[in-house]
Image (cartoon, grey):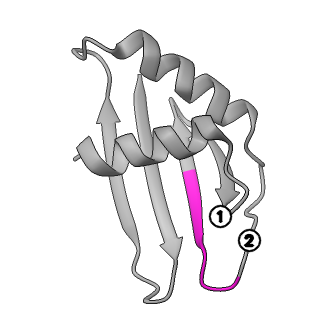
Amino acid sequence: MRIQVTRTGGLAGIVRRAELDTAERTDAPHVHALAREAVAGGLRAPSYGVPDGFHYEITVDGRTVHCADPKLTDSQRELVSLVLREGA
């Protein structure tokens, strides 16, 4: 499974992108479950939360959803954190 996250917004307005391929990860089943839940809780159109908050675009195997701080689900928050921390 290929997961891409793009984070925009924030005070500085810096765009950050990362991608994670779960093919050889030992925790792949957990990451797949997070991705399914994150996509299920996302919106098709961009949504913007609070001023200077982050907006996220999550793409899982070609399907893109949007979410924004502070209204991320627990799954979205964990997935975004994982991909931005460990993704390339």
- SS at badge 1: loop
Indicate whether residue 32 is drawn in magenta: no
Which portion, as a residue range, is magenta? 51-57
- Bin the neighbour count of mark 2 within 10 Å (Cα to Cα): few under 14, some 14-19, many 20 and up: some
The quadrant the N terminus occupies is top left
Label 1 to label 2, Cα distance in Å? 5 Å
**In x, y percent, where is residue 38?**
63, 35
Residue 55 makes an appearance in the image: yes
- Say which of 45 and 67 sits in front: 67
Name which residue lies at 48% across and 64% down.
Answer: 7
- The residue at 46%/59% (across/down) is 6
79 or 57, which lies in front?
A: 79
Residue 87 in view (yes/no): no
In the image: residue 16, left or right of residue 79: left
Q: Amino acid at mark 1?
A: Asp
Residue beneath the point at 24% across and 42% down: 86
Q: Which residue is mark 2?
A: 49
Query: SS for tag 2?
Result: loop
Quarter of the figure with residue 71: bottom right
Residue identifier under label 1: 69
Looking at the picture, which amino acid does disc 2 mark? Gly
- Badge 1 vs badge 2, beta-carbon distance below 8 Å: yes
